[in-house]
Amino acid sequence: MIDFDHMIDNHLYKENKPKEIGRYYPSQIGSCLRKVWYSYKLPIDTSPELVKIFELGNIMHDFVVKVLKSEKNPEVELVSTELPFKQEYEDFLVSGRIDNIIVIKASGKSILVEVKSTGNVDYVEDAAPHNVVQLQLYMHVTGIHDGILLYVDKRNLKSKVFPVPYSEQEALNIIGRFKALHKFLKAGVPPDPEAREKRNTIWMCKYCEYRQKCYEEIPMSAKWL
Ligand code: SF4
């Protein structure tokens, strides 16, 4: 018999290379800043369970690209499935290939599409704030000020679309998060455990590789969930 679970783990395994302070990635900034800080200071391999969840997201993304490319959907033209990103801010760089954003043309207009897979689309009632973060940054940098978040249900491929209005102020706040991260990393001081501040972000901790360390360093209290 073959052990297919083990084969999947082998196939998806990637060594986590140490990251360089001063070089950041657009995909990081919607996450908890403390978690990102740990990933620079204490790099560890992502657990096989989480790697599989990320891979499901990639599979969904590829499926959405096929749907958008399909000749049976002539009202939409797929322009690009990857965007290069490189921005210098003061003494650090934000760069990387953005491969979770698709550019389409519909009714003559360019639109950025961010794809998110979800466990149950019936519970998705609005664009989630941590998803909007990346899209705002891309809209700001590309100058394409029309964006949508597309949620697709992993169980049955049902979907929901939410337009995201561009906000320069929000984009500047996001750039401010990179600046804050850079400052904390240079100082060697971790940021507050921001995901534990509110009920609507605590779910992030469930998927955080640094959960145990974070709770050891800052135990639960009236302030931190
Ligand atoms: S456990 Fe939660 S608050 Fe702490 S680093 Fe991870 S995501 Fe952030």
Image (cartoon, rainbow, N blue to C red):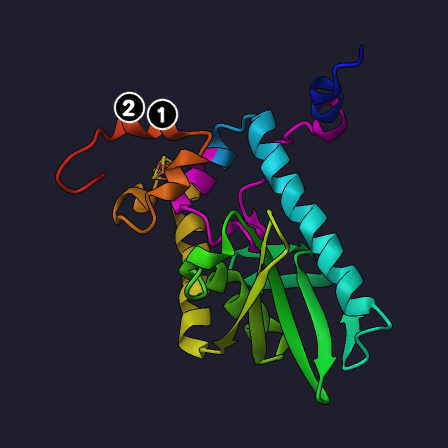
Q: Which mark is residue 39?
A: none
Give the residue type at disc 2.
Glu
* Residue marked by disc 1: 213
Find residue 181 and report its horizontal and vertical position in percent.
42, 49
Give the residue type at disc 1.
Lys
Quarter of the picture holding the C terminus: top left
Asked where in the image residue 203 lies, by quadrant, the reply is top left
* Residue marked by disc 2: 216
Residue 27 shows in the view? yes
Residues rendered magenta in the picture: 10-38
Secondary structure under badge 1? Answer: helix
Q: Is mark 1 within 8 Å of ligand 1?
A: yes
Q: Nearer the viewer, residue 59 or 44?
A: 59
Asked where in the image residue 191 lies, by quadrant, the reply is top left
Report how far apart the C-alphas of labels 2 and 1 lie in the structure: 5 Å
Q: Nearer the viewer, residue 80 or 1?
A: 1
- Which image quadrant shows ligand 1? top left
